[in-house]
Image (cartoon, grey):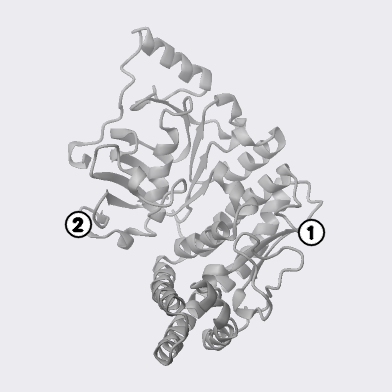
Amino acid sequence: MYVEHLSLTGFRSYEQLDIRMEPGITVFVGPNGVGKTNIVEAVGYLAALSSHRVGNDRPLVGFGADRAIIRGGLVRGEQRTSVEVEINAETANRARINRSNPVRARDAAGILKTVLFAPEDLALVKGDPSGRRRYLDEVLVSLLPHRAALRADYERVLKQRNALLRSARAAGRLSTAHEATLDVWDQHLAEAGARLLSARLLLVDRLRPHVQRAYRELTDGSKEANIVYASTVSSSADLPTEEDGAGAPGSPLQEGLAELTPPELTELFVAGLLRHRRKELERGISLVGPHRDELAVLLGQAPAKGYASHGETWSMALALRLASYYLLLEEDTTPGGDPVLILDDVFAELDAQRRARLASIVASAEQVLVTAAVGEDIPDALRGRRILVVPGGIAEDGTTTTAEDAMGAATGADAGSAPDAGVTDQPPEDDRA
């Protein structure tokens, strides 16, 4: 699969931008702050309906605007599809598929599949458990878009149960009415949580060999990488803080749940809620469930967080992303089933050896989109179409192969000797916003 046309209206720094794309490698080159990441962020948003940079949609809408539109023309084998997502500042987002009537934005999820690498990925190893949970849920939805409902259902029930816990805490005691109602919400939470937990456990089992393979490819293979799902549902000891997570020495969280069915997980979940009810009432929040679980990332026998070197941390973060790419390839072997690979300013963070190894792995993908502030950071294996990004638009001649050529084009534009450095490659009239 590849994106052949991208149109942005009111998205981030772009009032209007239209770019014709093609299979293979495309590198967006330009100084920091001109909008390179905004372009690939928009492609990622079309796939995941979320940004890898911010937790909510409001910053995606240009300053002073009330909506932003991302429109993509997608090619999968012989099939062409247009997808448009309207991001609204005050109302629900909407989508159009092949210029149909507007539908819910989530109905467009999964049409485009992407795997995005970014400097923020270091948090997959060094950060709090929430980032690793989000990683798992994003891969789940990429594999099967309807899985998004699992997390949505769970969060809806969790919100209701937390409200009840806060109410009971404010009352200073657990009344008979509170207790009966809490029993009902315990069951609802356990059922919804068991479905999400089961899906995550199966996913981790499928990801594990790919993580191990990817880490070996990126390093000298002297250490074995591993991932283990650790759940609060199975813990009978004191629960760790969200910052501590699992996988640290002495963590009470246990693995070994993958063989259980959702009904068995539900029963275990309810028992865990009852066991920790007093603590939950004291704090007014739910302490047991997938929202508190952890993906433990290991190198050898030690957790990568706190024990891995900077280089090992980067290799582990890249391995997690590559694992999702390999799994998507494994899941869909039909022509055009490859996800689009996006590497957002990653090479500046890597040493020469890791740059070369990552480039050799991803270079054969159907479409690779790369951003870089310095063209020399891009390995030779990723030479391809270069697009110079300038404030508010792009400038290219379609044949540029080096960063120096692109920078020369920009210098010429400043001197008045080159074509206009604004938006180029305008789409046909019927494709415009």
The local secondary structure at tag 1 comes to loop
Q: Disc 1 residue type?
A: Gly
Q: Which residue is mark 2?
A: 100
The local secondary structure at tag 2 comes to loop
Instruction: Say above or below: 38 vs 142.
Output: above
Question: Quarter-wise, where is residue 272 in the image?
Answer: bottom right
Residue 339 horizontal/vertical position (percent): 47, 52
| Foreground residue among 154 and 17 | 154
Residue 85 horizontal/vertical position (percent): 29, 51
Of the image marks 2 and 1, the number of the one nearer the N terminus: 2
| Foreground residue among 330 and 216 | 216
**Label 2 CA crowd tier, 10 Å (few <14, some 14–19, many 20+):** few
Q: Which mark is residue 66?
A: none
- Left or right relative to 163: residue 363: right
Residue 329 horizontal/vertical position (percent): 53, 58
- Left or right relative to 66: residue 392: right
Question: Quarter-wise, where is residue 208 in the image?
Answer: bottom right
The furthest residue to the front:
172
The structure residue drawn at horizontal position 39% and vertical position 75%, both measured from the top left corner, is 160
- Left or right relative to 244: residue 195: left
* Front: mark 2 or 1: 1
Instruction: Say above or below: 302 vs 255.
Output: above
The structure residue drawn at horizontal position 49% and vertical position 65%, both measured from the top left corner, is 140
The structure residue drawn at horizontal position 57% and vertical position 48%, both measured from the top left corner, is 121
Q: Which residue is mark 1?
A: 300
Q: Disc 2 residue type?
A: Ser
Quadrant placement of the C terminus: top left
Visible residue check, residue 22: no
Instruction: Say above or below: 191 vs 390.
Output: below
